[in-house]
Image (cartoon, rainbow, N blue to C red):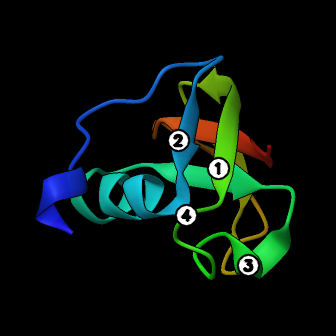
């Protein structure tokens, strides 16, 4: 997968699943997809990056608190 290595993705651009797979494998990010767990099942399927955020809130089951995680997050949709 190293030939598909991406260091960044841009909102509004399309990427193949194999490119996103490489990006997620080499970068500390979260990717949310509208096709659930099937994001990487078809390597040639294209996805559009529709939005990006600097982080997200996460609920801790340990102490019941909500914490902001400063981790780049991308939303992708099937094209």
How far apart are the alpha carbons under marks 4 and 1? 6 Å
Percent position (x, y) of residue 31?
A: 59, 52
Q: Nearer the viewer, residue 6 or 14?
A: 14
Q: Is residue 20 left or right of residue 45?
A: left
Which residue is label 3 attached to? 38
Query: How packed is label 3: few (under 14 Cα within 10 Å), some, or many (20 or more)?
Result: few
Whether residue 77 is situated above or below residue 22 in the rendered picture? above
The disc, 3 or 2, on the residue closer to the chain's N-terminal end is 2
Q: Quadrant of residue 47?
A: top right
For label 2, the SS is strand
Q: Nearer the viewer, residue 75 or 48?
A: 48
The reply to whether the C-beta atoms of the residues labelled 2 and 4 are less than 8 Å apart is: no
Q: Which mark is residue 46?
A: 1
Which residue is label 4 attached to? 44
Query: How packed is label 1: few (under 14 Cα within 10 Å), some, or many (20 or more)?
Result: many
Query: How packed is label 4: few (under 14 Cα within 10 Å), some, or many (20 or more)?
Result: few
Q: Which mark is residue 15?
A: 2
The reply to whether the C-beta atoms of the residues labelled 4 and 1 are less than 8 Å apart is: yes
The disc, 1 or 3, on the residue closer to the chain's N-terminal end is 3
Is label 2 or label 4 in front?
4
């Amino acid at each position: 997968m190293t030939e598909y290595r991406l260091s960044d993705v841009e909102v509004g651009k399309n990427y193949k699943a194999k490119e996103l797979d490489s990006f997620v494998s080499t970068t500390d990010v979260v990717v949310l997809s509208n096709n659930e767990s099937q994001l990487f099942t078809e390597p040639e399927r294209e996805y559009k990056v529709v939005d990006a955020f600097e982080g997200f809130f996460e609920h801790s089951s340990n102490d019941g608190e909500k914490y902001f995680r400063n981790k780049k997050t991308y939303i992708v949709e099937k094209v």
